[in-house]
Image (spheres, rainbow, N blue to C red):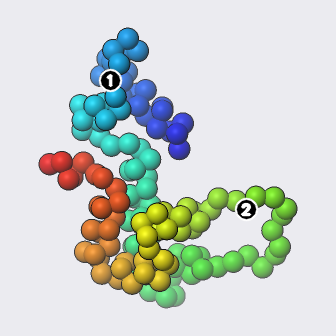
Amino acid sequence: MNKINAFHNGCLRWICCIFWLNKISNEELYKRTKTESLVIEIQCRRLRWFGHVLRMSQDNVQKNVLRWTPPKKRRQGRPKTTWCRTVMAELKEMGLTWDEAQHAAKDRERWRQLVIALCHTRDEED
């Protein structure tokens, strides 16, 4: 994710004609361009989609995939970083358990407020 952010910041600096001699912070860059860090943007969208999936009906494929575990044994070594594990880590950072997240996602407005609180979006500045 750091590489994505670095590339994004470099592109923003190039578009704004801010060269390496003119040092400004990333926060100042985001204010000038009225954007946000791509890591935060990806995190917000991931959590929004997660809430959408949790509100789906039980027979929906996307919802079933969240709890599915493969029948075979895993290979030796570090487990793969999956989308679901990433979401679970973000929920842990928010201080939510899986069950609390499912309960909160049922109420759209509450889930939206949780996501906004986590992701300091540019909507708060307006």
- The amino acid type of the residue labelled 2 equals Pro
Kindly state the secondary structure of the residue where label 2 is placed: loop
Tell me the kind of residue under disc 1.
Ile
Residue 34 falls left or right of residue 115: left
Q: Position of residue 77 (x, y in %)?
A: 81, 58
Answer above or below: position of 85 versus 29: below
**Front one among 2 and 72:** 2
The quadrant in which residue 70 appears is: bottom right
Identity of the residue drawn at 46% across and 38% down: 5
Q: Is residue 12 above or below residue 94?
A: above
Crowding around mark 1 (Cα neighbors within 10 Å: few <14, some 14 to 19, many 20+) is: few
* Residue 79 image label: 2
Give coordinates of residue 12: x percent, y percent.
36, 28
Residue 33 appears in the figure: no
User: x, y (%) of residue 119?
Assistant: 34, 56
Helix, strand or loop under label 1: loop
Residue 14's image quarter? top left
Residue 5 can be seen in this image? yes
Which residue lies at the image location 43% right of the left edge and 52% below the top edge? 42
Q: Is residue 124 left or right of residue 81?
A: left
Q: Residue at x 38, y 65 (%)?
A: 48
The x, y position of residue 46, in whole percent, is: 44, 61
Q: Distance from label 2 to label 1 (Cα)?
A: 39 Å
Left or right side of 62 for 38: left
| For the residues bearing labels 2 and 1, Cβ distance under 8 angstroms | no
Of label 2 and label 1, which has the lower sequence position? 1
Q: Which residue appears farthest toward the top when viewing the image?
A: 21
Query: Which residue, given by chain and number where applicable, does mark 1 sit on?
Result: 24
